[in-house]
Amino acid sequence: MPIKVLVVDDSAFFRRRVTEILNAHADLEVIGDAANGKDAIDKTIQLKPDVITMDIEMPVMDGITSVRHIMEQAPTPIIMFSSLTHEGAKATLDALEAGALDFLPKKFEDIAKDKKEGTQLLQERVKALGRRASMMRRPTRAPLGTSSASQPTTRGLDRNRFGSGATPSRPSSLSRSPESAPSRAGVTSSSARASATPRRASGKSYKLLAIGTSTGGPVALQKVLTSFPSNFNLPIILVQHMPAAFTPAFANRLNSLCKISVKEAVNGEPLRPGTAYLAPGGKQMVLEGRSGNVVLKVLDDDSGKLTYKPSVDLSFGSAAKIFGGDVLGVILTGMGADGREGCRMLKQRGAKIWAQDEASCVVYGMPQAVTSAGISEENIDIDAMSPAILKELNYG
């Protein structure tokens, strides 16, 4: 059966455009549309779509408020359309905090080479969320803005929402698609350990924590980083697939919520303990120097050789050259396979590689890539990821 989609936007022209694009794919079917957030709530309850595309600025009720109500009444995967501006970035992060799972620029060709690629990007992102639709209607855990050891923030967040940072119950095999299901080879032992915190620390010494992620990453990163103590003394590199207009706002938001320092990386600055450096959107972030005297290089990349800007593979590969095996590499939820080759380089030098488990991912693409390749040593539920990291690094 095709994935059923509800299209929400106050522009009739944009609704028609999105509908035409989605209906052109055999696996997608637009079953209705809505012109404002209030209408979107009613249509969601009435039509029970698998995925919703949602505008942010609309009359009667805005998209962020609508997302909150939908997640309370009929949890459904939602992808937001936003502008590539500072204000658009803040609003998009608010939408993710409210429960949306993904976002695209309203002019989605802005992050594609041409109209065809932009069309395919929208179709694939909607398909990816449609595969997780069954999880949205299951019991859930804690909202975005909280850590596993803390209470919710005072932002009006509801506890029972998967999209707002909570993770779903384990899906049945019926919820897996050929693309999202892991291959059988080499996965059984990892799956058996899924979501389990390692029984004891390995005893390895580390000089860097490296985390890569994409779709669903803002929520996952916040869940992990907000649990780190103020005395966390390793440098951290963060690679999140995100447009250039979004990474400054995202870094600032993380910094306001975390006990550690979080900032967008700046070219030439030294790598400091206890600080997390977010790779700037639209650029590449690499490490240069020697262990103990490492600087960040933020580079423009118009080569066309790398699909992702920033690229997890490139950042992780540079970490392998400098720190060798003294790295804990973690791959969180995301589409595609970015990070697999960078993790391979790290593991070949003795580093440890962990991946988020399938059930707690918004999209099981990047973690599946490192797991299926036999690179990941542990598959860990997002709720258990921070405790596992802290235990491995001897913080508990």
Image (cartoon, helix red, strand yellow):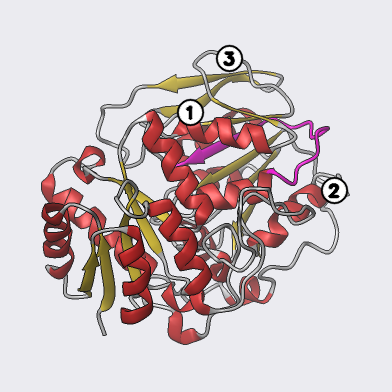
Out of 335 and 94, give the one closest to the viewer.
94
Frontmost of labels 1 and 2 is 1
Q: Do callouts 2 and 3 mark residues in contact (Cβ within 8 Å)?
A: no
Q: Which residue is mark 3?
A: 269
| Picture residue at 45% right of the left edge, 50% below the top | 95
Dot 2 crowding, Cα within 10 Å, few <14, some 14–19, many 20+: few
Residue 356 screen position, x and y as percent: 59, 60
The mark nearer the N terminus, 1 or 2, is 2
Secondary structure of the residue carrying tag 3 is: loop
| Picture residue at 88% right of the left edge, 49% below the top | 396
| Picture residue at 67% right of the left edge, 48% below the top | 154
Dot 3 crowding, Cα within 10 Å, few <14, some 14–19, many 20+: few
Out of 318 and 114, give the one closest to the viewer.
114
Amino acid type at circle 1 is Pro
Frontmost of labels 2 and 3 is 3
In this rendering, the answer to whether 88 lies above or below 142 is above
Rounded to the nearest angstrom, the CA distance separating label 2 from label 3 is: 30 Å
Q: Which residue is mark 2?
A: 203
Which quadrant is home to the N terminus? bottom left
Q: Which residues are magenta?
A: 226-241
Quadrant of residue 200 within the rendered picture: bottom right
Q: Which residue is mark 1?
A: 248
